[in-house]
Image (cartoon, rainbow, N blue to C red):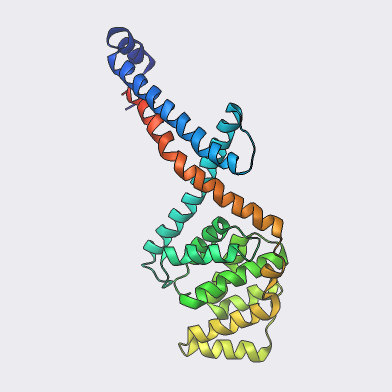
Amino acid sequence: MATSIGDLVATLGINNLPFKSGLTGAQASLMSFASKTKATLGSVAGMFGVGIGVGGLVYAAKNAVAAYTEAEQAEKKLGAVIAATCGAAGLTKTEMISYASELQRVTNFEDDATIAAMGVLATFRQIKGDHFKEATAAAQDMSAVMGTDLQAAMLQVGKALNDPIAAMTALKRAGVSFTEAQKDQIEALQKSGDLMGAQGMILAELKNEFGGAARAMADPMIQLNNRMGDLNELIGQQLKPAIVEMMTSLTGGLE
């Protein structure tokens, strides 16, 4: 329940013990957080032989926690989709995250971006197992060549594999061409119930036109920046609980 200003003034004027208690707890948590921040960021700075002032510590801590929170949300979204689809993709969240990390090592795509895009792909229940991994790589290749957003490319690939017959026209608009023989074969496979066979033909054509592009365009500086981003997220993961504890103590006296 929200506390009105009048109630707050009356509370502080008549009985300020809860507020003092909360403030004392917040002070202790703040000291703990400051100490943890200095130790965590200071050790990282020491690795690179640089010094960080108080302002730099605050900025770095804020940036690290924001980076970790973004990564955490992408993983939570992926987990929620997997749960909602009853694991239709046939891969666990851990397996998907591991594959995203594997792709980060050989492309310019950071793992968080791939994990977020996997959350989109996982909504298509007909894409399973190895085809899910191949679709992820195909979307990265298409995104790299066409210069489009990864999630948009993943959505396009997901639609194509979920219903190959309906999606061939859409893929043509994106520059993916199928011969009449291919169209007939894809349609025959899907209508006969062999959806995975039809998906295989779609993936094969995507590989023929875009295959390997994401790896070929990998830039060492971008990849280094992605690895530094992982380090930043790790720092944020260590600092976030201290911030939550500090804010809980600070607001506790106002209840």
State left or right for residue 167 relative to residue 80: right
Quarter where residue 250 is shown:
top left
Q: In which quarter of the image is the N terminus?
A: top left
Q: Which residue, as the protein is rendered here, is positioned at the far top? A: 13
Name the residue located 67 percent from the left edge and 68 percent from the top edge: 214
Front residue of 173/66: it is 66
| Left or right placement of residue 60 versus residue 82 in this view | right
Q: Quadrant of the C terminus?
A: top left
- Percent from the top left, x then y, of residue 193? 45, 87
- Quick one: 121 or 191, which is closer to the camera? 121
Give the answer, above or below, for where 56 lies relative to 184. Answer: above
Look at 59% across and 79% down and name the residue there.
Answer: 203
Residue found 38% across the figure and 15% down from its top? 5
Q: Is residue 38 above or below residue 199?
A: above
Query: Is 142 or 240 nearer to us in this picture?
Result: 240
Q: Where is residue 130 in the image (x, y as percent from the top left)?
A: 49, 77
Please state which of residues 33 and 174 is positioned toward the viewer in this rendering.
33
Q: From the viewer's perspective, is 72 left or right of 3?
A: right
The picture places residue 101, in percent across and down from the top left corner, at: 54, 62
User: Is 17 displayed left or right of 134 in the figure?
Assistant: left
